[in-house]
Amino acid sequence: MFTTRRHQAIGTFVVVILLYATIGHAADLTTPEGVLRALVQANENKDMATIAKFMAHDGDIVSYTIEGRKYVGWPDFARDMETEFKDAMRIEIPITELKVWTRGETAWFAMELDYIRYLGSGKDEVRMLLPLRETGVMERRNGQWMLVSFHESFRSDVSITPGTSSSNQAFPSLK
């Protein structure tokens, strides 16, 4: 009986620690910075539902990503992200710098991050590091901060590992 109570106590302790760690690391979705961090985490987790939740779907929104790719509205961006999530075995996105400014219902940001994508697996795994800079605009709509436009570019020259076989349209020349 002592062992059972001991196991229950240890199990309860582990659950409390895990809940605390989860809550402690959860983004504050009431701030533009929190929403940006949630979007980066959703990208890393290949979570299109969260990305869709915090990005505006207006048909006239214009955004740019690397390689000069232009997105007008949501559908083309969503399609390319789905393709990226299928092509990359895993994604890591450490944010190295983030500055956010707000005025009323509008926020703008400058962010630097390392977009690390892994293609293949085992001995065939290829790691691609894309040092990125992003700027963008957010709006608070119905009490929720939303990303409405972004511009993404390389922070420095990028050396792409030869031999990758990605068919990803989000990174057309990174094949």
Image (cartoon, grey):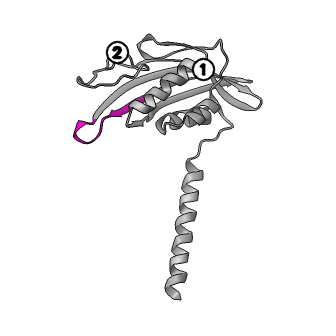
Task: Give how far across and how far down residue 136 sits, in percent.
Answer: 57, 20
Q: Amino acid at mark 2?
A: Ser
Question: Where is mark 1, residue-wise?
Answer: 74
The residue that appears at 42% across and 23% down in the rendered structure is: 132
* Tags 2 and 1 touching, CB below 8 Å: no
Furthest residue in direction bottom, as rendered = 1
On whether residue 124 falls in the magenta region, the answer is yes
Q: Magenta residues, as a range?
A: 114-125
Circle 1 — which element?
A: loop
- Residue 95, image x, y percentages: 46, 33
Q: Is residue 162 left or right of residue 105?
A: left
Would you identify the image quadrant in which residue 8 lies?
bottom right
- How far, Cα to Cα, is label 2 from label 1? 22 Å
Q: Is residue 101 magenta?
A: no
Q: Position of residue 99 (x, y in %)?
A: 55, 27
Residue 34: x %, y % from top left:
61, 36
Q: Residue at x 51, y 73 (%)?
A: 10
Q: Is residue 95 above or below residue 69?
A: below
Secondary structure category for the residue under label 2: loop
Q: Please, is residue 131 above or below residue 38 in the view? A: above
Q: Name the residue furthest right.
A: 142
What residue is disc 2 on? 173
Mark 1 or mark 2, which is nearer the start of the sequence? 1
